Image (cartoon, grey):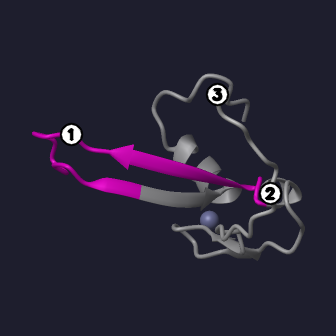
């Protein structure tokens, strides 16, 4: 048997302070509280790429953000547009 007691603990965690587009450098400072931070950052999209063994980018991991304008520009350069893209 295990007994538990509810205790208050001080937790240190990372909070989103700003988002910057890796392509154009546009930055948005995030000023709202808690769950609203993600809404405030919604005009940016985060991308994550993991390259496996034998890839041109062997074992590299890339993480970056793009603003909606840059994302639209990149997607407009696609020969085949993503499903759901309506522009
Ligand atoms: Zn941008």
User: Can you tell me which quadrant of the image ligand 1 is in?
Assistant: bottom right
Q: What element carries label 2?
A: loop
Mark 1 touching mark 3, by CB under 8 A? no
The numbered mark, 1 or 2, whose residue comes first in the sequence reads 2
> Magenta stretch?
41-62
Q: How far apart are marks 1 and 3 (CA)?
A: 45 Å
In this picture, residue 24 sits left or right of residue 17:
left
Foreground: disc 1 or disc 3: 3
Q: Residue tagged by mark 2?
A: 7
68 or 76, which lies in front? 68
Compared with residue 25, is residue 73 higher up or lower down, i.e. above or below? above
Say which mark, if any, is on residue 52.
Answer: 1
In this picture, residue 5 sits left or right of residue 65:
right
Q: What element carries label 1?
A: loop
Foreground: disc 1 or disc 2: 2
The image shows residue 18 at horizontal and vertical percentages of 70, 74
The image shows residue 4 at horizontal and vertical percentages of 74, 42
In this picture, residue 12 sits left or right of residue 52:
right
Say which mark, if any, is on residue 1.
Answer: 3
The image shows residue 40 at horizontal and vertical percentages of 83, 60
Q: Quadrant of the N terminus?
A: top right
Mark 1 touching mark 2, by CB under 8 A? no
39 or 12, which lies in front? 12
Compared with residue 2, is residue 17 higher up or lower down, i.e. above or below? below
Q: Residue visible at 48% across and 37% down?
A: 78
Q: Residue visible at 65% across and 33% down?
A: 2
Q: In which quarter of the image is the C terminus?
A: top right
- Please rate how many residues cluster around mark 2, counting C-alpha atoms within 10 Å: few if below 14, some from 14 to 19, many from 20: few
């Amino acid at each position: 048997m295990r007994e538990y007691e509810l205790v208050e603990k001080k937790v240190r965690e990372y909070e989103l302070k700003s988002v910057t587009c890796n392509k154009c450098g546009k930055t948005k400072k995030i000023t709202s509280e808690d769950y609203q931070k993600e809404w405030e950052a919604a005009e940016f999209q985060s991308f994550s790429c993991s390259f496996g063994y034998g890839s041109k980018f062997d074992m590299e991991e890339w993480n970056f953000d793009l603003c909606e304008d840059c994302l639209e520009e990149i997607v407009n350069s696609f020969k085949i547009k993503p499903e759901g893209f309506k522009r």
